[in-house]
Image: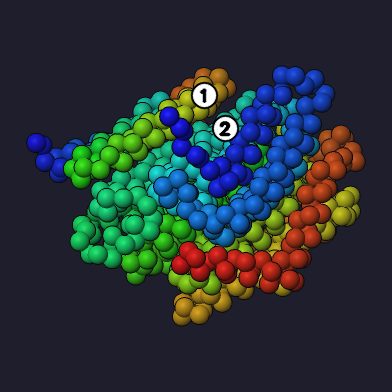
């Protein structure tokens, strides 16, 4: 008897990440307490190895494992994105974990496992595979959100994310089951051809589509399923919040795009309006609520809701250019947000005691470089020209205009302009206010010079460079995104 | 043979009961059990369809769902235990440190 040959190349990045995730946890007991942070180096090497593995995937395009996994430039692009996010997050967490005294190995292990799930979501060609990838990501994220075990807020973030996340997953799964019943398959391209034959129960398909939409909307935090976001983002440890606001969200969009453009294009006039309304609600709720916040994590949580709304604008364009601009924007948004959270993590004291916007007062004098970088990220998130945020938004809104979505674009532009108000508040606090002015007397040890580790500095520097690179020279990455968007469409 | 619709309607009722339980109940464990009920109603849907159209794949999916539900239960109960240790309560109304 011979065993069937199983190709390992199509899932090489996932395999490498899994092996390194296990290795990180295995080496933990053999590492003396003061040297635990070398585990982060090991995890980082794992991400680099997976990046190398991902390059090999470019030469292996095609469908594998009975069509469950697809390797195309769309999945390769998203693998790159997830690995970049994971690498930056690992570096950004290093100092934070030492400062807060939480376990290292499980943290990095879970981060790598979650990235495995995200890569599966990007490369899934089949609904059950998407479900599995989504759950691998979500289950790891539930734990990461509650990683500061003794902190009540962190507990609360984990509970809320876990309960509402599994609740939404059940909806997604029910949608998959109905879709399976109607079309007799879960393969995306076969669903699409089954829909074209017309010999199917349309009620089941529509119910399935609606339920799947609920599940995806929850994962990418768009209205009316964004309620969990502010609480979870505020309570989770700072580097986890930064990572959550970009990684699982990008993975959610990858699966969302692939399912709706590959499997359900026949119904696009039906789900288009849902996207349109959801987009307007998401942008407006996110931006309005962000203006009222005093906690910077909570403000960026609402900002991340608003950004999901902008992405839906390009989604509703229903064109390959729209998809390409979403892919570009997810990358741009990731580096801006990860950079911003790296700054917050460096500035917040142990126990996250310094996270309100007023407490950024004086950062401009005490840490001019840190303040300058933070300003770049905030301006990028606003969409000021020369930054990645502007270029990304420009491509997304242009795609919407090309599809004659004038009203939606106007609402998005107004929202974008309004967001300047809350993005400027930390900047004003940093440069124009004195530290004691907010009324709170700071403890003497709080004004001690800030220690910023090398790893955090690298993350901030790389993010700043990426913000300007994507803002000034977007063509290389946009061309790649465009070539892959045509495959999906 | 029992018609397909009976199974689908039963599954839909179970799913709705899960949703209602999740929304109405205030105990974390009960809410979690409601989610499990929803997942199991999905399993029933998968099996019913699979039997009806004579394709085995639906029954395989149920195994995946069960395994993932088990993993989720392990993590979820651990999170609930961590919360209980800090607050000595399982009431979801006390998960209220963060408000709008």
Q: Residue at x 72, y 45 (%)?
A: A48
Quickly name the residue at label 1.
Answer: B78
Q: Which quarter of the image is occupied by the N terminus of chain A? A: top left
Image position of B50 (left or right of A281): left
Q: Nearer the viewer, residue A447 or A218?
A: A218
Tell me the tag on residue A143: 2
* Quarter holding residue A244: top right
Q: Nearer the viewer, residue A23 or A66?
A: A66
Q: Please state the horizontal and vertical placement of residue A324, each as a whole percent of the image.
A: 56, 67
Q: Please state the horizontal and vertical placement of residue A356, each as a whole percent of the image.
A: 70, 46
Relative to residue A52, is residue A466 depicted above or below?
below
**Same subunit, tags 1 and 2:** no
Q: Nearer the viewer, residue A95 or A450?
A: A95
Q: Residue at x 73, y 71 (%)?
A: A473
Relative to residue A139, is residue A49 depicted above or below?
below
Q: Are marks 1 and 2 in contact (CB under 8 Å)?
A: yes
Q: Residue at x 55, y 48 (%)?
A: A10
The subunit letter for the residue under badge 1 reads: B
């Amino acid at each position: 008897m011979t065993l069937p040959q199983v190709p390992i190349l199509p899932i090489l990045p996932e395999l490498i990440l899994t092996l390194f995730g296990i290795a990180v946890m295995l080496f933990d007991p053999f590492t003396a307490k003061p040297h635990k942070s070398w585990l982060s180096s090991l995890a980082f090497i794992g991400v680099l190895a997976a990046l190398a593995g991902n390059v090999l995937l470019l030469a292996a395009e095609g469908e594998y494992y009975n069509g469950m996994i697809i390797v195309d430039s769309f999945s390769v692009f998203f693998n790159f994105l997830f690995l970049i996010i994971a690498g930056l997050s690992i570096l950004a967490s290093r100092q934070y974990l030492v400062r807060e005294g939480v376990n290292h190995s499980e943290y990095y292990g879970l981060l790598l496992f979650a990235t495995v799930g995200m890569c599966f979501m990007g490369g899934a060609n089949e609904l059950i595979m998407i479900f599995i990838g989504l759950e691998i990501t979500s289950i790891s994220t539930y734990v990461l959100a509650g990683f500061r075990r003794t902190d009540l807020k962190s507990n609360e973030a984990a509970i809320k994310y876990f309960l509402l996340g599994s609740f939404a997953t059940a909806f997604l799964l029910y949608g998959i089951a109905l879709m399976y019943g109607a079309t007799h398959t879960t393969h995306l391209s076969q669903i699409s051809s089954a829909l074209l034959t017309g010999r199917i129960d349309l009620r089941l398909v529509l119910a399935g589509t609606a339920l799947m939409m609920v599940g995806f909307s929850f994962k990418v935090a768009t209205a009316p399923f964004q309620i969990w976001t502010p609480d979870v983002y505020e309570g989770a440890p700072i580097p986890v919040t930064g990572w959550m606001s970009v990684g699982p969200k990008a993975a959610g969009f990858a699966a969302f795009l692939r399912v709706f453009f590959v499997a359900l294009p026949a119904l696009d006039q039906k789900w288009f309006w849902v996207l349109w309304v959801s987009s307007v609600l998401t942008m407006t709720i996110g931006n309005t609520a962000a203006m009222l916040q005093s906690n910077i994590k909570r403000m960026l949580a609402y900002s991340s809701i608003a950004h999901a709304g902008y992405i839906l604008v390009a989604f509703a364009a229903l064109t390959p250019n729209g998809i390409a601009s979403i892919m570009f924007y997810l990358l741009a948004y990731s580096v801006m947000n990860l950079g911003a959270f790296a700054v917050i993590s460096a500035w917040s004291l142990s126990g996250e005691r310094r996270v309100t916007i007023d407490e950024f007062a004086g950062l401009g004098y005490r840490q001019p470089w840190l303040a300058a970088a933070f300003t770049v990220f905030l301006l990028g998130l606003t969409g000021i020209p020369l930054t990645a945020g502007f270029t990304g938004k420009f491509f997304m809104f242009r795609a919407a205009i090309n599809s004659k979505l004038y009203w939606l674009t106007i609402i998005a532009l107004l929202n974008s302009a309004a967001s300047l108000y809350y993005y400027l508040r930390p900047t004003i606090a940093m440069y124009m206010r004195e530290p004691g002015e907010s009324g709170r007397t700071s403890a003497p040890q709080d004004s001690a010079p800030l220690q910023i580790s090398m790893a955090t500095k690298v993350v901030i520097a790389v993010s700043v460079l990426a913000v300007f690179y994507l803002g000034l020279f977007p063509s290389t990455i946009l061309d790649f995104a465009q070539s892959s968007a045509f495959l999906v469409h | 043979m029992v018609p397909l619709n009976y199974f689908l309607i039963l599954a839909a009722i179970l799913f709705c009961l899960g949703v209602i339980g999740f929304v109405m109940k205030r105990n974390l464990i009960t809410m979690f059990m409601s989610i499990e009920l929803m997942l199991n109603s999905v399993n029933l849907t998968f099996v019913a369809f699979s039997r009806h159209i004579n394709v085995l794949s639906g029954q395989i999916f149920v195994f995946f769902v069960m395994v993932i539900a088990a993993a989720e239960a392990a993590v979820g109960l651990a999170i609930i235990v961590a919360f209980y240790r800090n607050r000595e309560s399982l009431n979801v109304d006390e998960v209220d440190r963060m408000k709008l």
